[in-house]
Structures are given as structure tokens and as C-alpha cells.
Image (cartoon, rainbow, N blue to C red):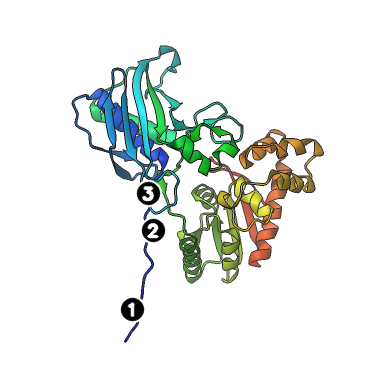
Amino acid sequence: MKKEQRHPKRLRSGFTTGACAAAASKAGLLKILCPDMGIKEVSIPFPDGSRHEFALFSLERNAHSVVASVIKDAGDDPDVTNGAEIGVEIRLRSGKDEVEPGQEAPPISFRAGPGVGTVTRKGLAVPKGEPAINPGPRRMIASAIEEAFREAGFSPPRSQIVDITIFIKDGEKLAHNTLNPRLGIKGGLSVLGTTGIVRPISAKAWTDTIDVCLNVAEKAGLREVILSTGRTSEAAVQGLLGLPDEALVMMGDYLEYALKAAGRHRFKRLHLAGMWAKIIKAALEIPQTHVRHGALDMDRTSRLLIELGMPQGLRDCVKSANTARHVLDLLLEEERLALIRAVCQRARQYAERLSGIPVTVYLVSSEKKIITQA
């Protein structure tokens, strides 16, 4: 009897905290603009052009504001906020002095409510003193707010401000299970998510996907591929090289695995694309670059940079840096591009040793620009 082939269960994707906050924001504003509207769910736009619906957990109108919330579904990802209540308190207020001339959409004021942290150190995606609400979620919320005005048939006065206070139930307690306290995010969690979608983390799923992508590239007759740590770095290097889609291999944090796997194929060159935190970990020969395997060791980082030519005077600044991004900001401020390139060269040497193939390393910024290559 032929043995029945068993297929692994496909892991289910979910939604980011930022996407949940955007859905709650749209629902809350609609309730302000159309008090009699019955709202049980909302649909919001995502950065990739798709749309997704969210069922409301709560929607309550107060004297001067509306509180709306949803329950986060992170899919099969082991996210600490899976099942948490994510919500906003939203209100409209006059703010003539805060509106820039010619501004079309009403400005949004973001505030940290209970369970949402505040940034207290440099080197993060938002400035010190700001609520820990990353740029991606802010853009998603702004799009949802603009859509709510359109759907309600309102043209907001230029002098109006949309105040949004985001809260995460039990967020301060949940934050102890993250790196937020170490990074200087005080009082709760960060509101994260560039794409709005949470992709499940599964080592076997990742490595299987890497193998499949490499096989497809080789079968297509390609002699070079792009190994990227994320979509931002992938897009930047693909924009430069213009390789076929089959050449794009998303390796995520599985650096060592991807390089060794690529070495088993007949490629003539690898293009390694990543942002600073991943590239410097490659230069330090860290095989798995996800933060859950450890935050960047600033002592090791400073020793590497001194070995590569950093002046001793910068050592204390690097050792006391809050994040990898903070280190890069320091080097850019000091105009140490040659030193940054030397880090990329060291990452290239590690990659070539593991893969046995010539490698070009590209350091990519969060704005999808290539800072340097080696």
C-alpha cells in the first residue's frame, strides 16, 4: 500500500499592532462624524494596496471623544500581543497654530495611552520623547483617518487636529517579555508593523522557503541571486540590479543557513542585501541575526570598529549606544563612510567563506537607499 504523503500545516498570518490601531482609529472617527452609524467592523487599506476587515471589540462615544478597540490576531506567530485589546481614544479639536499652510489632510497628534511606551533614548525609529509608535503604523493610521473622512462625506476644516491616544491592555506588563525596557522604551509596548501583516516565525518554514527559492533560481538558469534580510533591502538592491524575480531570495535572519545553501548551487555571485543591524552582525560572524538570539553586543561592536580603524575617542560613544541604528547614526555624523564600508567588507569575507562564492554586500537604509556596498 502506498504511504499517504503528509503535508505540513501552512502557518496562518496575522495583523500587526499598528494595523489594529489603524482599524480602531477609523472606527472611532466614523463614530464621531456619524454618531448614528452602526459600526461592527471596518475595512482599512494596507501599504501593499490590499484591504482587510477588523471586527470591533468595543466602540463607545463619550462627551468629547470616542474609544474604539479590536482584539489582535497575530495568526500563528508567537507574538506577545496576540489576543490583546488594542484601541484608541480619538477626538477632534481646533488647532490653528499647528496647521501648516496648504496642508490638505488634517494633522494627527499621536499620544501614548496605557500600555504604550515612550521612547527615552536615541537610536530608535522615532525621536526621544515621542510615543513608541513607529512610522509605518503612523502612516497606516493616517490613511485610515483620511478614508474615514471620505466615507463620512466630510471635508475637515484646515484648523482641525485629530488627537489619537493609543492604548494596549496590559501592555506595560507584556513589555517585560520584550527588549523594550533594555532599549529605553518606558511604560509599555511599541506600536509596530511596516506592512500591517505578521508573518509567522517558523525555522523550518523559513529554511524550506530559502531552499525552494534557490532551487527555482538555479532551474531558471540564473547565475546570481539576491539574498536579502527583508523587503526594504531587497527592493533597494533589486532596483539597482534589475534581476529577474526568480533571483530574489528572502533569507530573513537565517544568514548562515542561506549562505551555505547557496554554496550548494552553481551560482557565480551572491548579492547580500541588508540594513545596518544585520550587516554588522554578519561582520561579527553571528550566524542567526534575529534579536531573540541576543541584542547587538556593543562591546564586541566597538572592538570590531576599532580593529577596522575607528578612533579610540569614539569607543565610549559606541559602547554606550542604545541600538545598532544609534551606532550607524554616530558613524554617519562623524562622516566615517570608509569605516562603514569596512564593516561591509568584513561581512563580505564571512559570507564568501561560508558560501564559497563571490559576494557583494549592500548596506541599505530604511528609506530603501543603498548607503554603500563592498
Which dot marks residue 11? 2
When the figure is inspected, residue 235 is found, relative to residue 35, above or below; the finding is below
Helix, strand or loop at label 1? It is loop
Separation of marks 1 and 2 at Cα, in angstroms: 21 Å
Question: At label 3, which amino acid type do we have?
Answer: Gly
Helix, strand or loop at label 2? It is loop
Separation of marks 3 and 2 at Cα, in angstroms: 10 Å
Q: Is residue 148 visible?
A: no
Residue at point 41%, 38% (across, down): 18
When the figure is inspected, residue 138 is found, relative to residue 290, above or below; the finding is above
Q: Quadrant of residue 31?
A: top left
Earlier sequence position, callout 1 versus callout 3: 1
| Horizontal side of residue 41 vs 303, given as left or right | left
Task: Please state the horizontal and vertical placement of residue 241, each as a whole percent of the image.
Answer: 55, 54
Toward the viewer: 255 or 4? 4
Would you say the residues marked 1 and 3 are in contact, meaning their CB atoms lie under 8 Å apart? no
Q: Which residue is mark 1?
A: 4
Q: Is residue 246 visible?
A: yes
Which dot marks residue 14? 3
Which dot marks residue 101? none
When the figure is inspected, residue 237 is found, relative to residue 23, above or below; the finding is below
Task: Please state the horizontal and vertical placement of residue 73, each as a whole percent of the image.
Answer: 36, 46
Residue at point 63%, 50% (across, down): 279
Mark 3 crowd level (few <14, some 14–19, many ≥20, 10 Å Cα): many
Question: At label 2, which amino acid type do we have?
Answer: Leu
